[in-house]
Image (cartoon, rainbow, N blue to C red):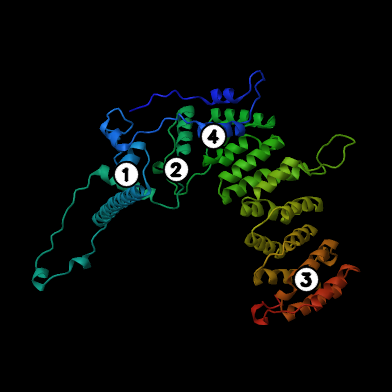
């Protein structure tokens, strides 16, 4: 039977053991635990459980009669799927199925593309075969009996509209003509609306040569004149939208000329250079560099240009200098549009050459473009001190040059052994410095004969400080190049 015994709490046991009249002391948790253990050990009336057979027989016992609710082990995949989580094995299966489906889709698309391409090729071949005249020799096949029969000429009626379309197709396939872009069509429509005359078409022109020069409508001229005025006051911000479509036009040079680049602010020149250099190809970017940057560079350093009284010599603007550095993003455009025309011009001053060469010294240049520029400068017949400045800066980059370029540099210095002009007879200190850099860097890439000829040049062109260093470098050289690979020195 179940004994209904009133349990004593821990606090009641503690109060019973404390002496009366004394204040209660606050015990720690460890002390309370010890007292609890002592109380339960000394408690004699603590209820005990009944024997097992009595609890089984008695329904009110503590024994559990009804079984506990068992948690059925569910499928982990189903349980995880219900929880929103997929295990690694299922994920692997799903990925494999997705990969197989993707490969099947790609194979179907590739097969469809191949079939479409094959059909297009068959249509083109059939069209060409139908339009190609059949030679008589190709018809002379078969037996001798067939040759005795009279030939029957097949007459095919051609629709004039189809013939016109076919002739237009052949004209469009001509690679010599420039493709017509959307911008050209828009400009033609504007021109037709302004002038009231239809746009010229190649079908109605008698001359075979394409007409490059076009007349700009008055509205276009007025718009880009205003764009030029905006660029003259430009300091920062976005460029006008009408200006950004200029590189897409076939006659972009004419439109750019209308904006008057000479009145642009230096900030506008810098932003326009970044935009045109990144948009145009190298051959078109060369025209921009030569037409805008070179002229602006000369104008800012022109000593004869008017300036305020009392001011010093004209200096190059920082924005123009940075624009020239940005133009080296297209090295071919920079060399062919700026450096070589500047070096070959007779009006190039040493000050301009020093400023331009500092750009080369600060920016990395591809070795191939540097080698071509060195060869062009060395082969220039009209020698000036500016050429030596550019040669010195390019040689200081110490690129691995082809033997052909090294031979051109050797012949460039050999020209001063028997000078023909006054400029060659009296060289500047920059020429000796360029000669010294060449001897220090490429002394082992020349032949022994070339070294002997260069030593003879030092007997004609001497400098009290630099010439001994050049002679010392040439004598210490160990040529590793066979003489057969060099060109004759008599050239």
Residue 474 horizontal/vertical position (percent): 80, 76
**Disc 1: CA contacts within 10 A as few (<14), some (14-19) or many (>=20):** some
Q: Which residue is mark 1?
A: 77
Identify the mark at residue 250; answer none if there is no mark.
none
Measured in 3D between alpha carbons, the distance from the residue under mark 1 to the one under mark 3, in whole angstroms, is 79 Å
**Side of 415 where 261 appears, left or right:** left
Would you identify the image quadrant in which residue 276 lies? top right
Q: Nearer the viewer, residue 76 or 424?
A: 76
Q: Which residue is mark 3?
A: 439
**Front of the two marks 2 and 1:** 1
Measured in 3D between alpha carbons, the distance from the residue under mark 2 to the one under mark 1, in whole angstroms, is 63 Å
**Residue found 10% across the figure and 69% down from its top:** 146
**Residue found 64% across the figure and 78% down from its top:** 485
**Visible residue check, residue 316:** yes
**Front of the two marks 3 and 4:** 4
**Side of 1 where 341 appears, left or right:** right
Q: Is residue 268 above or below residue 108?
A: above
Q: Which residue is mark 2?
A: 180
Q: Which residue is mark 4?
A: 37
**Front of the two marks 1 and 3:** 1
Quarter of the rendering occupied by the C terminus: bottom right
SS at mark 4 in the image: helix
SS at mark 3 in the image: helix
Measured in 3D between alpha carbons, the distance from the residue under mark 4 to the one under mark 1, in whole angstroms, is 49 Å
**Disc 4: CA contacts within 10 A as few (<14), some (14-19) or many (>=20):** few
**Front of the two marks 4 and 1:** 4
Would you identify the image quadrant in which residue 13 lies? top right
| First-in-chain label (4 vs 1) | 4
**Residue at far front of view:** 44
Residue 257 horizontal/vertical position (percent): 62, 38
Measured in 3D between alpha carbons, the distance from the residue under mark 4 to the one under mark 2, in whole angstroms, is 103 Å
């Amino acid at each position: 039977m179940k004994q209904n015994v009133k349990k004593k709490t821990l606090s009641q046991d503690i109060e019973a053991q404390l002496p009366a009249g004394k204040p209660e002391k606050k015990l720690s948790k460890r002390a309370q635990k010890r007292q609890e253990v002592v109380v339960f050990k000394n408690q004699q009336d603590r209820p005990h459980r009944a024997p097992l057979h009595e609890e089984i027989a008695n329904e009110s016992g503590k024994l559990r009669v009804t079984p506990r609710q068992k948690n059925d082990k569910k499928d982990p995949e189903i349980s995880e799927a219900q929880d929103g989580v997929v295990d690694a094995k299922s994920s692997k299966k799903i990925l494999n199925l997705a990969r197989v489906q993707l490969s099947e889709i790609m194979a179907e698309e590739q097969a469809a593309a191949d079939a479409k391409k094959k059909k297009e090729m068959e249509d083109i071949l059939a069209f060409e075969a139908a339009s190609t005249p059949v030679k008589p020799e190709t018809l002379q096949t078969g037996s001798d009996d067939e040759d005795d029969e009279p030939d029957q000429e097949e007459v095919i009626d051609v629709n004039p509209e189809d013939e016109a379309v076919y002739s237009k197709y052949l004209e469009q396939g001509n690679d010599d003509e420039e493709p017509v872009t959307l911008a050209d069509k828009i400009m033609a429509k504007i021109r037709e609306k302004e002038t009231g005359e239809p746009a010229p078409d190649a079908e109605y022109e008698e001359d075979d040569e394409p007409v490059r020069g076009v007349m700009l409508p008055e509205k276009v001229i007025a718009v880009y004149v205003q764009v030029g005025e905006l660029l003259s006051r430009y300091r920062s911000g976005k460029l006008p939208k009408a200006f950004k479509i200029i590189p897409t036009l076939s006659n972009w040079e004419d439109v750019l000329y209308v904006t008057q680049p000479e009145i642009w602010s230096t900030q506008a020149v810098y932003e326009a250079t970044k935009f045109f250099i990144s948009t145009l190809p190298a051959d078109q970017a060369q025209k921009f560099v030569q037409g805008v940057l070179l002229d602006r560079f000369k104008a800012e350093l022109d000593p004869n240009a008017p300036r305020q009284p009392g001011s010093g010599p004209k200096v190059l603007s920082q924005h123009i200098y940075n624009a020239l550095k940005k133009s080296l993003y297209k090295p071919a455009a920079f060399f062919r549009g700026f450096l070589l025309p500047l070096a070959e011009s007779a009006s190039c001053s040493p000050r301009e050459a020093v400023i331009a060469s500092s750009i080369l010294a600060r920016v990395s240049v591809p070795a191939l473009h540097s080698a071509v520029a060195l060869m062009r400068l060395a082969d220039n017949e009209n020698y000036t001190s500016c050429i030596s400045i550019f040669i010195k800066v390019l040689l200081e980059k110490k690129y691995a040059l082809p033997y052909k370029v090294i031979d051109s540099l050797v012949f460039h210095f050999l020209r001063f052994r028997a000078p023909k002009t006054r400029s060659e007879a009296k060289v500047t200190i920059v020429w000796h410095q360029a000669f010294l850099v060449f001897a220090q860097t490429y002394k082992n890439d020349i032949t022994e004969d070339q070294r002997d000829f260069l030593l003879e040049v030092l007997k004609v062109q001497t400098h009290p400080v630099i010439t001994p260093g050049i002679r010392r470098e040439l004598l210490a050289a160990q040529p590793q190049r066979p003489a057969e690979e060099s060109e004759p020195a008599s050239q």
